[in-house]
Image: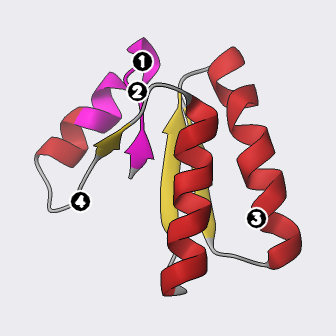
Amino acid sequence: MFTLLGEETNDLMDAFAASFIEVVLYRHEQCAAFMAWGHGRLTGRPAACSATLGPGATNLVTGVADAQPDAKPLIAITG
């Protein structure tokens, strides 16, 4: 999971902390989306990125839109 912390994603982060899912924190949602896209491109396996509501969600759009034409596996979650 490529993400950054936000108020609306705290429960999601707590769930990941209690599981086997590795969380990689970034300073901007767009970076998280591109990292998930790159992971999918290199491994062929889906990677997830998440963001908080509103502006955080719109910051994911560029990375998600870039992955779509290439048909790379990407999961985007917003708070």
Q: Is residue 9 magenta?
A: yes
Q: Amino acid at mark 1?
A: Gly
Judging by the rendered image, the residue that carries numbered circle 2 is 9
Q: Secondary structure at mark 2?
A: helix
* 4 displayed left or right of 57: left
Residue at 60% over, 48% down = 33
Graded by Cα atoms within 10 Å as few (under 14), some (14 to 19) or many (20 or more), the crowding at tag 3 reads many
**Which numbered tag is attached to residue 67?**
3
**Which numbered tag is attached to residue 21?**
4
Q: Amino acid at mark 2?
A: Thr
Depth order, front residue of 72/12 = 72
Q: Amino acid at mark 3?
A: Ala
* 64 displayed left or right of 25: right
Which residue ends up furthest to the right in the rendered image? 69
**Pointer 1 with pointer 2, Cβ within 8 A:** yes
Q: Is residue 64 visible?
A: yes
